[in-house]
Image (cartoon, helix red, strand yellow):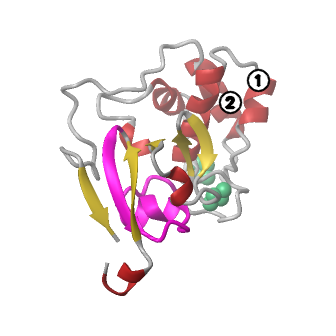
Amino acid sequence: MGGLGAIAAMTPLTINDLARGIDMDPATPLLWALRDGANLTGAKYGCGNGDCGACMVLVDGTALRSCLVTLGEAEGRFVQTIEGLSRGGLHPVQQALVDEGAIQCGFCTPGIVLAAIGLLDRNGRPSEEEIKAAIANLCRCGAYPRIIRAIRSASGQRIRRTPPDDAAPAPGFETAPGSETS
Ligand code: FES
Ligand code: FES
């Protein structure tokens, strides 16, 4: 907290099913609130302008670029990051990306996984054109054909949003609701 205490305020929100409070300026981009305030570094900084999708997270089930959302705008909302997906094993989208060999450097992967989940929650059987339209994320490794095949492969499968009760916490998770400070 330190010198920022005068301008910071505790912002309550739910991250990966845990109630959290983040003590940062509410104008902070959600990306940095997650990375620096909650130690969840799965959302990546690519462009900071909304162009690349590397920072994508789900907010109330909708895939959003967290560099364009402020912490204040996320107050009271349910945020899902890549860290919340794998506590009970790989999510079907993640498994499909592995099976298709669609992960090269992996920098774009968390954003693509969450964008795909956001799409498949709305449209369980998207066409290739619908996938291309919905997944505008940049992959500098050029794995697009494999990414599209993986998302088509994962479509129609049961999408598990909630990990099983006995799943081990993922790195960066607390076992009980708590608060974070910057
Ligand atoms: Fe957010 Fe590129 S870092 S879209
Ligand atoms: Fe490297 Fe997509 S796998 S940026």
Q: Going 42% across and 26% down the picture, which residue do you hit?
A: 161
- Quadrant observed for ligand 1 in the rendered image: bottom right
Could you say which is closer to the camera, residue 11 or residue 158? 11
| 73 with respect to 165 (left or right) | right
Q: Amino acid at mark 1?
A: Glu
Any atom of ligand 2 within 8 Å of the CB at mark 2? no
Q: Going 27% across and 23% down the picture, which residue do you hit?
A: 164
Q: Which mark is residue 9?
A: none
Q: Which residues are magenta?
A: 17-44
Element type at marker 1? helix
Q: Going 62% across and 16% down the picture, which residue do you hit?
A: 124
Residue that numbered label 2 is attached to: 148
Q: Which mark is residue 128?
A: 1
Could you say which is closer to the camera, residue 3 or residue 147? 3
Q: Position of residue 62 (x, y in %)?
A: 60, 36
Q: Going 60% across and 60% down the picture, which residue do you hit?
A: 67
Quarter assignment of residue 17? top left
Q: Is residue 102 visible?
A: no
Residue lying farthest bottom? 3
Element type at marker 2? helix
Q: Position of residue 127 (x, y in %)?
A: 75, 19
Q: Are marks 1 and 2 in contact (CB under 8 Å)?
A: yes
Instruction: Using the numbered discs, state the Cα–Cα distance from disc 1 to disc 2 in whole angstroms.
Output: 7 Å
Q: Is residue 88 magenta?
A: no
The crowd level at tag 2 (other Cα within 10 Å; few <14, some 14-19, many 20+) is many
Which circle's residue, 1 or 2, is located before the other in the chain? 1
| 47 with respect to 97 (left or right) | right
Q: Position of residue 74 (x, y in %)?
A: 52, 51
Q: Is residue 120 above or below residue 78?
A: above
Q: Amino acid at mark 2?
A: Ile
